[in-house]
Amino acid sequence: MQENYYSEAVLPNGIRLIHKEKQGEIAHLVLMVETGTRDELAHENGLAHFVEHTIFKGTQNRKAYHILSCLDNVGGDLNAFTTKEETCLQATFLKQHYKRSLDLFADIAFRSTFPENELAKEKEVILDEINSYLDSPSDEIYDLFEEMVFKGHPLARNILGTTELVKGFHRQDILDFMGHQFQGV
């Protein structure tokens, strides 16, 4: 096996798959969607981050607990992050659990249901995150800098959104946003 060998395929829906084999027992799986804060309208500020938090909260096949424990029960890790340009879901696991991980990712990406009761809980988590952020002057000054540099552009906005906007997000907002931003997923 070549060290830098990878294969690439594009699915009919436009999703691009990149696969690289590596030696060892640990495997990684990443789903990167090119949607972040820059893609939000003003009234959607923080919605990409909200989607990242809530996409794990239930699918047509799994409840939130089952999603979170699927890899955890076999020593794996499931996580996500949002930037101004992308939303990323990632997992690390023993390679023997690759099929389990791939099935979980497909379920999350294509069959998330965003149950209202779970959204309410996650709003509180994000509001705490916003408040913690406001207690960090080094983070705040970086965002103030970006507000000045990108004035009038979505890149000027904070990834987390605002307290008022996050409190007002509903399931339909997520579905609408995913409909126009996560088109291949």
Image (tube, grey):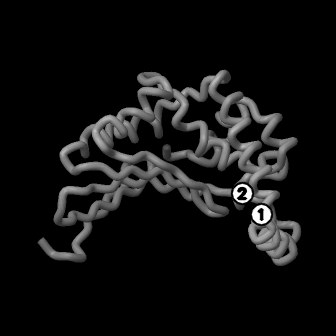
Q: Earlier in the sequence, mark 2 or mark 1?
A: 1
Q: Which residue is mark 2?
A: 159
Q: Quadrant of the N terminus?
A: bottom left
Position of residue 110 measured from the top left corner of the image (x, y, whole percent): 46, 35
Q: Is residue 9 left or right of residue 61?
A: left
Q: Residue at x 21, y 63 (%)?
A: 21
Contact between labelled residues 1 and 2, with CB atoms less than 8 Å apart: no
Q: Residue at x 79, y 50 (%)?
A: 131
Which of the 4 image quarters holds residue 163? top right
In this view, 99 is above or below 81: above
145 or 129: which is nearer to us? 129
Q: Amino acid at mark 2?
A: Ile
Position of residue 60 measured from the top left corner of the image (x, y, whole percent): 47, 22
Q: Residue at x 35, y 52 (%)?
A: 92
Q: Is residue 178 left or right of residue 124?
A: left
137 or 127: which is nearer to us? 137
At label 1, counting other C-alpha atoms closer than 10 Å, the crowd grade (few under 14, some 14-19, many 20 or more) is few
Q: Determine which of the numbered discs, if any, sits on residue 136 in the image.
A: 1
